[in-house]
Image (cartoon, grey):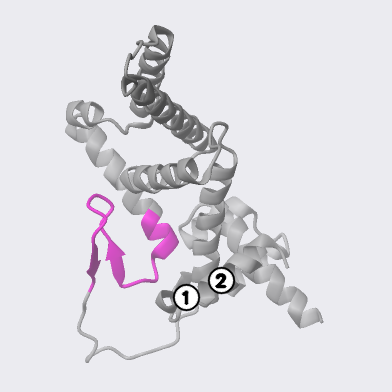
Amino acid sequence: MDNLEKKINKLRNLKQNKDKTNDELVVLAKEEIEKKDVISSLTFCKDDKEREFAIDLLERYTKENSIESEADKDTLRQLIDMEILAERFKYLLKIEYEKSNPAIPLNMVEELRETEKNILEIKTQLGLTNKNREQAGWIETWEDLRKKAIKYYEEHRGFNTIKCPYCQNLFHLLMRADKHEPIKSSWFRGTILYNIEVFKLFDEKRINIEEAANIMGVSSYYIELLYNEIYLKEKNDRKN
């Protein structure tokens, strides 16, 4: 059993996930594995206390901002490493100051200053500083919100419970259904956007991945993910 399947089974057993489909659990599992990979690849995380600190930082930063590219993820790892190092310097300086005859270790003070300077530069690069957000014009702010909204919509377009991309609060989209005729949609699998005919055409190489993505109105990555995680698995199950 691979890590992804283990994580899916673990999430499936949680009370808050009892109504989620397998496809939704796959998305949640991949997100958790990705976060775990960030933590496990840190350079300066040496014990449980620092690991807990790193996890808290990761949750906070990913909540504040969308980290989409691999380059951003690498930069985020570097930021958390620098934050851990700064905390370690502060802890050691506190020990020195609490001695009966404290001697200020100037080299450590300088190291802390440089580390905090690097932290500020990386936060600015990732758009995580208050100064950055305050100085951003309305066009940049709107574009950032638009990207977050589109990214969330592509991943969760089947849901009627929506998370605001700015404040992170949940709200419901309600509509009257008493005059609607219910029919089974061929474009959804549970609450995941999915159409088997499109994936069949892609599998038979009658359309390429970009054409499949255009038909579905999603990214090529989305097509590749569902093709591997749903279509191919079901195709293999049918053969067996």
Residue 145: x, y in percent? 27, 45
| Direction front: furthest residue | 100
Q: Nearer the viewer, residue 19 or 41?
A: 41
Residue shown at the point (26%, 55%) measured from the top left: 168
Label 1 near label 2: C-beta < 8 Å?
Answer: yes
Residue where numbered disc 2 is placed: 10
Residue placed under numbered mark 1 in the picture: 14
Q: Is residue 93 left or right of residue 139?
A: right
Few, some or many C-alpha atoms within 10 Å of disc 2 (few <14, some 14-19, many ≥20)? few
Asked if residue 158 lies in the magenta stretch, the reply is: yes
Quadrant of the rendered structure where residue 65 is?
top left
Looking at the picture, how far across and down is residue 224, in whole percent? 62, 56
- The residue located at (43%, 8%) in the rendering is 107
Percent x, y of residue 93: 37, 21
User: In what element is the residue under mark 2?
Assistant: helix
| Farthest-out residue, right | 240
Report the magenta residues as a range. Answer: 152-173
State the quadrant of the C terminus.
Answer: bottom right
Depth check, front residue: 4 or 200: 4
Separation of disc 2 and disc 1 at Cα?
Answer: 7 Å
Picture quarter containing residue 181?
A: bottom left
Establish if 167 lies above or below 8.
above
Which quadrant is the N terminus positioned in? bottom right
Under tag 1, what secondary structure? loop
Query: Residue at left 42%, top 58%?
Result: 154
Residue 125: horizontal and vertical position, in percent? 38, 26
Q: Residue furthest top?
A: 106
Observer-nearest residue: 178 or 122? 122
Badge 2 amino acid? Lys
What's the residue at 36%, 15% (across, down)?
Answer: 113
| Magenta residue check for 77 | no
